[in-house]
Image (spheres, rainbow, N blue to C red):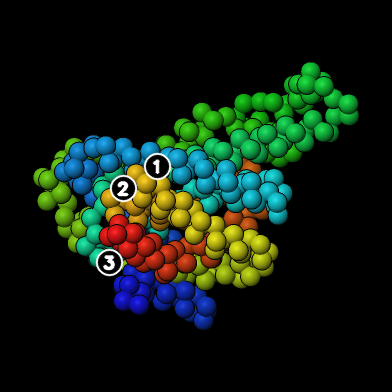
Amino acid sequence: MQSLLDPAILFFALGVFAGLVRSNLEMPAAISKFLSIYLLMALGLKGGFALAASGFTPSVATSLGLAVLLAIVVPLVGYALLRRVLSGFNAAAVAATYGSVSAVTFVTATQYLESQQIAYGGHMAAAMALMESPAIILAVLLANALRQKEQAVAVPNSTPAVVAMTEAGTGTRGGPGHDNGKGGPHLSVGKILHESFTDGTQLLLLGAMLIGLLTGDAGKAAMQPFSGDLFKGMLCLFLLDMGLSTARNLPAVRRQSPWLLAYAVLGPITHASLALGLAWLLAVPVGDAVLLMVLAASASYIAVPAVVRYAIPEADPSLYVSLSLGLTFPLNIVLGIPLYTQVVQSLWAV
């Protein structure tokens, strides 16, 4: 219960309450954007400073390797399960959402670990960045494969040669930006990677981390008022805004299938359990193990929807946005982070 009395979590709860009672409390869009930029910049700097102090060790390599593995396994398993209750395009979109990560959940988890005086590696900010793109790439590849299959079925008695000629004639086999005949662009992996790693949030996070790594202790001392003293208050403001957003998405959550609601609750727990098992087998440090669980359990509600709405227009945005922001995000913030921390501490103490 003490963990729930953290100011950041309480401000999130205040935002949810304000939204539910239809208060006129709101955060201006410009302020929300500033807060997200600040948090990413501060997180990157703190990660860079910590990495400068620790160096690139085998433990760092292990944590980053596990992050990439989880980013591949989680969306593939999610797609296989979701395909039983959703169309292929919707399954790919939801699997991408839950296979990617939430930066705000991660930032909240780092702050929680610091409040509990649990050390974690600065490289985990890089792990978060690495985990964002694989699920998006896999979802787009799955969607492209589904479109190719539908095109093949649409041509009676087709052979591969006939399908290829049909696609060439209709413009369904094109480069990035070409229409596939059903409203969805056939994106290349190279374009997805370029957009992922040059995205403003990714670039700011990794750039700030590099600056922190290069400047080390001198940079940490100079930036302490910015990236240290102000961090908690800025996070509280941002989570207040996220609480308001969560309340706005709750009506859409109620309209979802019970199977999807179950996935939004049990899926993250399963993903976190997978991360826990791998971290325990490879003796990942306590703080890093907690953050791997948090990352595996989180779901993207910003980066993935922004890409998927364009790359997989056949999917219903109300599915993946409402589930991730209206259900999974608050569960992780309020209950998940303290629970994952307690589980790791208990197992690692044995």
Residue 11 position in % (x across, y down): 37, 73
Q: Secondary structure at mark 2?
A: loop
Q: Residues within 10 Å of mark 3 (few under 14, many from 20)?
A: few
Residue 240 visible somewhere in the drawing: no
* Residue located 75% across and 25% down the image: 167
Q: Secondary structure at mark 1?
A: helix
Q: Earlier in the sequence, mark 2 or mark 3?
A: 3
Residue 348 lies left or right of residue 171; in this view the side is: left
Residue 219 position in % (x across, y down): 15, 45
| Residue corresponding to mark 1 | 66
Q: Check the image and name the residue furthest to the bottom.
A: 21
Amino acid bearing label 2:
Val
The circle drawn on residue 280 is none
Residue 1 position in % (x across, y down): 35, 77
Amino acid bearing label 3:
Gly
Q: Nearer the viewer, mark 2 or mark 1?
A: 2
| Residue corresponding to mark 2 | 284
Q: Nearer the viewer, mark 2 or mark 3?
A: 2
Q: Earlier in the sequence, mark 3 or mark 1?
A: 1
Q: Residues within 10 Å of mark 1 (few under 14, many from 20)?
A: many
- Given residues 147 and 75, the one toward you in this image is 75
